[in-house]
Amino acid sequence: MSKTHSLSRMRPLRLRVLGNIVAGILVALILFFLVLPTLIVIPISFGNASYIEFPPSGLTLRWYAQFFSDPDWIAAALFSLRIAFFTTISATIVGTLAAVGLARGDLPGKSLVLGLALSPLIVPHIIIAIALYLVFAPLRLTGNFFGFLIAHTMLTVPYVVISVSASLQRFDPLLEMAALNCGAGRGRAFFEIVLPQIAPGVTTGAVFAFVSSFDEATVAFFISGIEGKTITRKLFEDIDFNLTPVIAVVSTIIVAVSILLMGTIRLAQNRANTD
């Protein structure tokens, strides 16, 4: 009886372990399918052929040298980096204040305000791009740094709002109340008590804002100009008219920047957990 009972208890455990293994294999296959196109681009960027070739027949750094020696590519990359840097600053400030206001404030129509703040994640970018072009063109903001800053800030604020809101959910408001009761003002309590506690969420939102601004393509395609051209707009132009492995080089650089920044997020989260 005891042996039969133990076998009947072990059977569900074995089925659970088998189910976990099958689920793990399926998740791994899905992730591999999603990452495979990115992995293919990397060896193509080192190919020695003058056209897109996979697998490459030989390896060379010729296309990387061509990218870094091309003034048009460098100008587009620096323009994108400048936009992403200032977009990160503006989106982090606006998104953090919006998240704090929505979490702590008793605002009328709070759900509507939150929906509007997160709408760039829901509305297709092609619709946003057309609307921005129709508004920016008469104001001469197309191909303009400030036009890109406004557009990209609008597109990236939702990432900051979401990440900071998640951090605020884990923050104990009694700490802020204690600081206020001890005589600290609202500003001092925020910068000395609240902000250090939600810093991981702010950092995560800032990194997502930078990445999404740097590799944003749809809106950039509509509001770019002859001089003000992002690296993604230049990428699309070369795909149409000058398809060489330099395209793969640019894609590899964008992927490397994204992975580096995502690794920064992970390190910041681990450090916050250990502290």
Image (cartoon, rainbow, N blue to C red):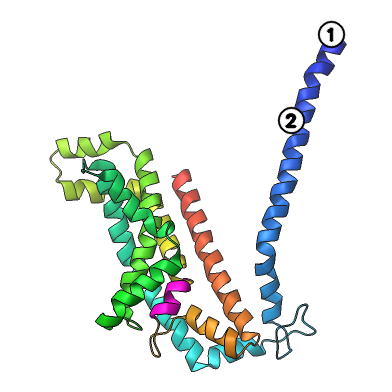
Question: Looking at the image, which residue is at 82% across and 12% down?
Answer: 5
In this picture, residue 110 sits left or right of residue 54: left
Q: Are marks 1 and 2 in contact (CB under 8 Å)?
A: no
In this picture, residue 263 sits left or right of residue 43: left
Q: Is residue 206 magenta?
A: no
Question: Looking at the image, which residue is at 79% across and 28% down?
Answer: 14
The residue indicated by pointer 2 is 16
Residue 235 spot, x, y in % from top left: 54, 82
Amino acid type at image mark 2: Arg
Where residue 171 sits, quadrant-wise, is top left
Q: Circle 1 — which element?
A: helix
Say if 149 sits above or below 116 in the image. Answer: below
N-terminal of the two: label 1 or label 2?
Answer: 1
The residue indicated by pointer 1 is 2
The segment highlighted magenta reads 216-223
Q: Is residue 219 magenta?
A: yes
**Residue 100 tag number:** none
Q: Nearer the viewer, residue 264 or 111?
A: 111
Q: How would you classify the magenta stretch by its main secondary structure? A: helix
Q: Circle 2 — which element?
A: helix
Q: Nearer the viewer, residue 172 or 129?
A: 129
Question: Looking at the image, which residue is at 40% across and 90% down?
Answer: 226
The C terminus sits in image quarter: top left
Q: CA distance from mark 1 to mark 2?
A: 22 Å
Q: Which mark lies nearer to you, 1 or 2? A: 2
Where residue 153 sits, quadrant-wise, is bottom left
Question: Looking at the image, which residue is at 41% across and 63% down?
Answer: 209
Q: Nearer the viewer, residue 234 or 189?
A: 234
User: Does the image show residue 195?
Assistant: no
